[in-house]
Image (cartoon, grey):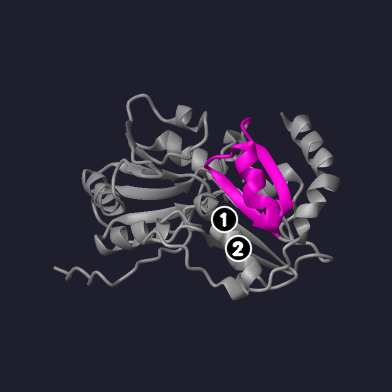
Amino acid sequence: MNARPSSSFIRIPLESRLHGEARPAWLGFETRTGRVSLVGAGPGDAELLTVRAARRIADADAVVYDHLVGDGILELVRPDAQLIYVGKEAGNHALPQDEINRLLVKLARQGLKVVRLKGGDPFIFGRGGEEMQELVEAGIACEVVPGVTAAAGMAACTGIPLTHRDHAQTLIFTTGHLKDGTVNLDWTALARPHQTVVIYMGLGALEIICTQLVAHGLPADTPAAVVHAATTPQQRIVTAPVRNLPASVRAAGLSTPSLIVIGPVVDLHHVLCPAAVEALALTA
């Protein structure tokens, strides 16, 4: 009998084809257990879901889903499948992350095809890396199905190109909410010129973020925006210079989920937004 490989081993099978469809590489062991797909649900609009994501959701025996999964996406889940909510909202976590990790392992060990459904992309501030680590260490076959991240969806719907040869040669994604609840970012790096900074989960720290960026050299008149519920019918945008952004957002009453965008490309919103709105109307 062959010895079972150690838990540090990661098996990456060669790509095979079935009926012309490229099959994904599964990480983990060849076992008799189920499998887990970490699926990106995209930025909110159900029509931005990928074809592979839709197939995995429709085929799943259990779907473990987050708060920011867009309307209509859960309609793809089979009526007989388990539907388990583990969403995280400010000050209200349905399940701590460690328990979510253990839940995925438990469901897979029951022989189920599990979808871990996340807003945006699993590997962009989605804790997909933490969950995959747990699955691989437990010997569970797992894959990642990428999704359209919130920043990309926001850019398409607001006419704010994240990069532009005349304005931004660098793009930075960062989070305004660290694991310990602090906001301690690399302010000097974020304040550099000729770049676009997109901050996820930063609305509660908007005042601190804007103050620190200006204190570390960002011109106070740098264009900035906060976009609420990008790609959905609830989308709202507030634009203002960095120095005025917190007051403008308070006056507008924006809430989470919202993205903060900072950089010269924000000014293009006023030029390109009519075109972006028209393009979206043509595809509706």
Element type where label 1 sits in the image: helix
The answer to which of 60 and 202 lies nearer the viewer is 202
- Magenta stretch: give its range: 233-262
Q: Quadrant of residue 206?
A: bottom right
- Point 60% across, 75% down: residue: 188
- Point 37% across, 24% down: residue: 79
**Amino acid type assigned to the residue bearing label 1 in the image:** Glu
Q: Position of residue 117 (x, y in %)?
A: 42, 43
- Please determine whether, in this image, residue 269 is positioned above or below residue 252: below
- In this rendering, would 206 be left or right of 225? left
Judged from this view, the residue extending furthest toward the top is 79
Q: Position of residue 10 (x, y in %)?
A: 34, 68
In three-dimensional space, the C-alpha distance between marks 1 and 2, rounded to whole angstroms, equals 6 Å
- In this rendering, would 97 be left or right of 256? left
Q: Position of residue 21 (x, y in %)?
A: 54, 48
Q: Are marks 1 and 2 in contact (CB under 8 Å)?
A: yes
- In this rendering, would 159 be left or right of 135? right
Classed neighbour count for the residue bearing mark 1: other residues with Cα under 10 Å, few (<14), some (14–19), many (≥20): some
- Please determine whether, in this image, residue 170 is positioned above or below residue 102: below
| Label 1 sits on residue | 207
**Amino acid type assigned to the residue bearing label 2 in the image:** Thr
- Please determine whether, in this image, residue 111 is positioned above or below residue 79: below
The quarter of the image holding the N terminus is bottom left
| Label 2 sits on residue | 211
- Point 19% across, 68% down: residue: 4
